[in-house]
Image (spheres, coloured by chain):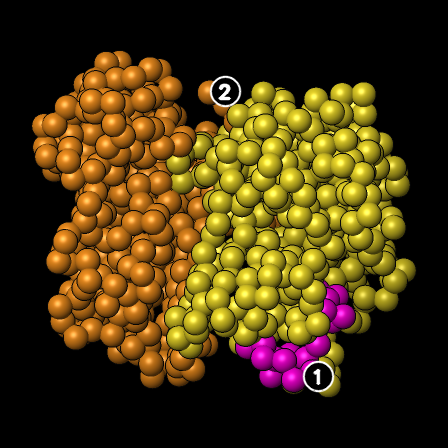
Chain colours: A yellow, B orange
């Protein structure tokens, strides 16, 4: 496929970091929550090698926050997800599938409990704000639902702890996985969580106030010069190797959390107030008929997966691949797909129709690399 | 600004027409409702001249439909918009501002009454499906809300009637503005409306079933060869000249319909069931403090407006410009902006901070060209 040009208008929002991202040599973007998200700098493969060895700063402002605040904040947030939020502590982040009344996936955000009556839902690519606001309006809940001026900046890679300690202090090393602390930058307290859309370790800084964006970016680069810090972004190859799903690609509203392999986040047997609970409970008896799997595609590098690729066996369709990339470290094509129960056992041989021909493949566990 | 590359993954959906759009030489895209929307073919200016003289076929599949079906379909659709839908007929399309409980704009779709218990809401760039589903779930309405496999294809330009008559029959000439008829293509009845995102006249075909996309595209091009038919797309210059607003650029959830100049679509004095009615009623007494206007920017061609440009006068901020383009026919820069009441009178001189310097400008009526 030819390189494709993106027309940028005010409808595709810039971020507090866009000028810095451009100065750092961004090579391509995608659009995510109506906002610019870088997709490569040097190249996807060069970025991948760097991410696995050093440390990168990522403009993931497009992970917008849905802030739910008020006396009914817990009730509304629990209505959105089948994960039991009742024991959540004030410094916790939960990966939370969000489902509609039929149990269909609407988003797969990370939810933060900010205080007793306030949650931030850090969203994937869909207007979850509209769903939350619709429920609040329909049920006349006592709650404000809004998008604050909060733009996450991720620091990812094996040297992330060292870089962050230089800017936020040694205390960052004590933050546990999917926990956060409030740490000051230039006198402003910000939520700093150990989380991020890679398997290389690191943090997400919820930059509270766009005016802190460039000073923080500059501070991280000044502090990290000898660590080889670079601008980066969620990396297609690394996230497939790590089995990190992409909402809109690997799962949509057509899929249940069980199909997405997210059953461990569904506490539907508990008496939680989730809107999709009854639908999900009904599914428990039979279990899903298809589920997300890794797929190892044989042969040389396949092109990008720009639309689902048919997976078949013995002349019958048995699934589809929705993300794929050549893994330089694993020396094979790694992919994520939705595979029917008949063929989802690890090691099953299937065929995948790629733009570069039909390829032999085998069903694999996720992640490919721990 | 350098040309920017777009990375395409399965998350950015292709349409039933994408292969034809590529074959027709699409030069750039934008992303709209998680879907590819072409933004230029030969060039924005060449496309503009052609659109005003001939006829174009536009892949506007990204105008996704929110289908609201069931006994409560009227009730839910009316909950979404302050426009009174009670007298809507089965062949009518209404331009419908959609607002939240505070009267903030959530979308500005065209709503079609498909039958007594079924509406299609043909949306601008936000997941209005989530808002509609949220209200339905919150109020336990008896209604199904879904996105059907319907992809609008627009035929726009002064020769649109001639082209459409050749493919759908002479009856298309009798379709009135914002009315539709069900017309057959290859035995499949489709909604054909006289509407579209240009001021050059034409139709939108709601292609019902993706498998009809390429045959219909091919039929239109075969029938229109001597009319000079070309692939096109919503044209930035022409739509600004025509005063057509872009949701996400010219208006957002921060704006009320009154600020957007859409008061004539707000029947809030009637006893309609719109969720935002009370908020909008409260605003009627004072009226808006700012409103959308045309802005004529002096000097040579300004660059694209990729983020709001400050409008000021006498050293004070008095608004912002959100869309701008050089108009070859008007020999000036035309723009759309939100201007404070102090400076919104037609002819008022203001200054606009563009990337190519501060420019003198004057406030203008919309549309620039009828």
Depth order, front residue of A195/A186:
A186
Rendered location of residue B266, percent (x, y): 18, 61
Rendered location of residue A122, percent (x, y): 59, 54
The quarter of the picture where residue A142 lies is bottom left
In the rendered view, does B252 fall on the left or right side of A18?
A: left
Residue drawn 36% across the image and 80% down it: B70
Name the element at disc 2.
loop
Q: Nearer the viewer, mark 1 or mark 2?
A: 1
- The number of callouts visible is 2
Residue found at the far front of this picture = A187
The quarter of the picture where residue A158 lies is top right
Q: Which residue has dot 1 on it?
A: A269
Name the element at disc 1.
loop
Depth order, front residue of A17/B297:
A17
Residue B31 versus residue A247 in the image, above or below: above
Depth order, front residue of A157/A258:
A157
**Label 1 neighbour load within 10 Å: few <14, some 14-19, many 20+:** few
Q: Are marks 1 and 2 on the same chain?
A: no
Depth order, front residue of B20/A40:
A40
What quarter of the picture does the C terminus of chain B occupy?
A: top left
Residue drawn 41% across the image and 30% down it: B306
In the rendered structure, does residue B342 fall within the stretch colored magenta?
no
Specify whether residue A297 is in view.
no
Residue drawn 29% across the image and 77% down it: B75
The label number, if any, that marks residue A189 in the structure image? none
Specify whether residue A180 is in view.
yes
Q: Which residues are magenta?
A: A259-280
The label number, if any, that marks residue B2 in the structure image? 2
- Marks 1/2 in contact by CB < 8 Å: the verdict is no
Rendered location of residue B323, percent (x, y): 31, 33
Residue A203 versus residue B356 in the image, above or below: below
């Amino acid at each position: 496929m030819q390189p494709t040009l993106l027309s940028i208008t005010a409808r595709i929002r810039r971020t507090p970091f866009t000028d810095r991202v451009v100065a750092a040599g961004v090579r391509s973007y995608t659009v995510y929550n109506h906002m610019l998200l870088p997709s490569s700098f040097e190249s996807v493969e060069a970025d991948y090698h760097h991410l696995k060895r050093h440390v990168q700063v990522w403009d993931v402002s497009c992970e917008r926050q849905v802030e739910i605040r008020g006396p009914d904040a817990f009730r509304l947030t629990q209505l959105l997800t089948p994960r039991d939020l009742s024991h959540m502590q004030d410094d916790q982040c939960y990966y939370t599938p969000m489902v509609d009344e039929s149990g269909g996936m609407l988003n797969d955000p990370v939810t933060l409990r900010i205080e007793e009556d306030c949650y931030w839902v850090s969203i994937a690519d869909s207007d979850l704000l509209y769903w939350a606001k619709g429920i609040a309006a329909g049920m006349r809940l006592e709650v404000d639902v809004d998008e604050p001026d909060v733009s996450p900046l991720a620091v990812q890679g094996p040297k992330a702890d060292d870089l962050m300690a230089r800017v936020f202090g040694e205390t960052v090393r004590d933050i546990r996985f999917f926990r956060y602390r409030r740490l000051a930058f230039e006198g402003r307290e910000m939520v700093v969580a150990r989380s991020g859309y890679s398997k290389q370790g690191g943090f997400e800084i919820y930059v509270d106030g766009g005016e802190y964006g460039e000073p923080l970016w500059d501070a991280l680069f000044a502090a990290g010069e000898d660590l080889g810090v670079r601008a980066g972004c969620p990396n297609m190859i690394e996230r497939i190797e790590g089995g990190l799903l992409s909402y809109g690609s690997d799962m949509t509203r057509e899929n249940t959390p069980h199909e997405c392999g997210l059953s461990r986040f569904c506490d539907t047997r508990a008496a939680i107030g989730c809107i999709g609970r009854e639908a999900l409970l009904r599914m428990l008896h039979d279990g899903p008929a298809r589920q997300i799997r890794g797929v190892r595609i044989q042969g040389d590098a396949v092109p990008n997966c720009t639309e689902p690729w048919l997976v078949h066996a013995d002349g019958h369709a048995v699934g589809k691949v929705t993300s794929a990339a050549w893994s330089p470290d694993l020396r094979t094509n790694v992919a994520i797909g939705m595979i029917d129960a008949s063929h989802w056992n690890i090691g099953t041989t299937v065929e995948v129709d790629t733009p570069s021909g039909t390829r032999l493949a085998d069903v694999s566990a996720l992640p490919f690399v721990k």
